[in-house]
Amino acid sequence: MTKNHNILIIDSGIGGLPYFTSIKHLLEAHALACTIDYLADNDAFPYGAKNDSQLQAHLHTLANKLKEAHKHYDVIVIACNTASIYGKEIFTKHLPNTPILTTTPTLCMQNTSSESFLLLATSATCRAYQHLGNITIIPADPLVRWVETLFPQASQAERMKYLETFVIEQIPIQHPATLILGCTHFLHIKNDLEKLLTSHHLQIAETTQALAQELLQTLLHQGATKGKVQLGELYLTRYLPEDKAYYQKIAGEYHFEFNKHRLF
């Protein structure tokens, strides 16, 4: 008998979409019966500019809403480093019977032989790692906002011009070292950064494949059966006209249903 597993991927905006793509491809390769939904918590964007107490209060509220949501999920993927760091215990407390998978810069550090790291992340994520002596932290909240709001509409020339200025001003030449993309939004600009950082001799590390593999193993442990990967709905936490216009286009690009239902 086929059991369809429901998966929810969460981010504050579009940052989790590269994780969705990686997860979709891996689960399709294994032909598992599942439906993938995506929640953009856009009403709280950006997570990373909030202080610790604001983050924790919001994540308590979000986890509690998910507990009361109209749809049950077999696995929840927090595709956001900031929410993973500050929210893993909170989500586990509110949803004790649901596996909560997370992504943090620590995953990158564990999977490389590098001893020196640059952490490009939100202010909140950087705070959690500032005590480590082998990491140079680069808080980049304006870059997160740019990726969320301007990157999708920008031309390639406009993107490269903005990023070239950012690299020159913000990323030190420090090698050998590994640059950790510690905000999921930065996966959208990974290829552009690699081109611009050629002379820096930096290895770029991120966690899309690791998180997709963890999800695969979780589903197999739950007894996932063979079947089809289905794309579900893209949900928001704020539905202003400009939000709906922005995410309607994104939902189309990623083949999600949109604006049919509210998750909670």
Image: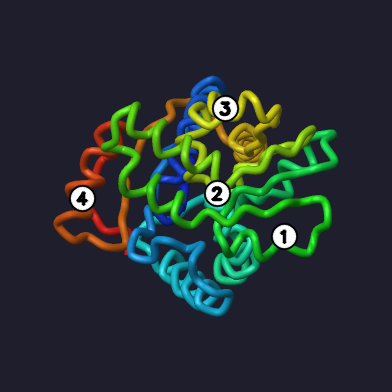
Q: Secondary structure at mark 2?
A: loop
For marks 4 and 3, the one nearer the N-term is 3
Which residue extends farthest left? 241
Q: CA distance from mark 4 to mark 2?
A: 27 Å
Name the residue that disc number 2 marks.
183
Question: Marks 4/3: CA distance?
Answer: 36 Å
The answer to whether residue 91 is left or right of residue 154 is right
Seen in the picture, residue 239 relative to 180 is either above or below; the reply is: below
What's under tag 3, amino acid-wise? Answer: Glu
Location of residue 72 in the rendering, given as x and y in whole percent from the top left corner: 44, 56
* Amino acid at dot 2: Cys
What x and y, as percent, mark residue 198?
62, 24
Q: Is residue 204 visible?
A: yes
Residue position marked by numbered label 1 in the rendering: 129
Numbered disc in front, either 4 or 2: 2
Q: Earlier in the sequence, mark 1 or mark 3?
A: 1
Circle number at residue 194? 3
N-terminal label among 1 and 2: 1
Q: Check contact, mark 4 vs mark 2: CB within 8 A.
A: no
Q: Nearer the viewer, mark 1 or mark 3?
A: 3
Q: Earlier in the sequence, mark 1 or mark 4?
A: 1
Q: Which mark is residue 64?
A: none
* Mark 2 or 3: the one toward you: 3
Secondary structure at badge 4 equals: loop
Find out whether the residues at labels 1 and 3 contact each other: C-beta distance under 8 Å: no
Report crowding for label 2: few under 14, some 14 to 19, many 20 or more residues within 10 A (C-alpha).
Answer: many
Residue corresponding to mark 4: 259
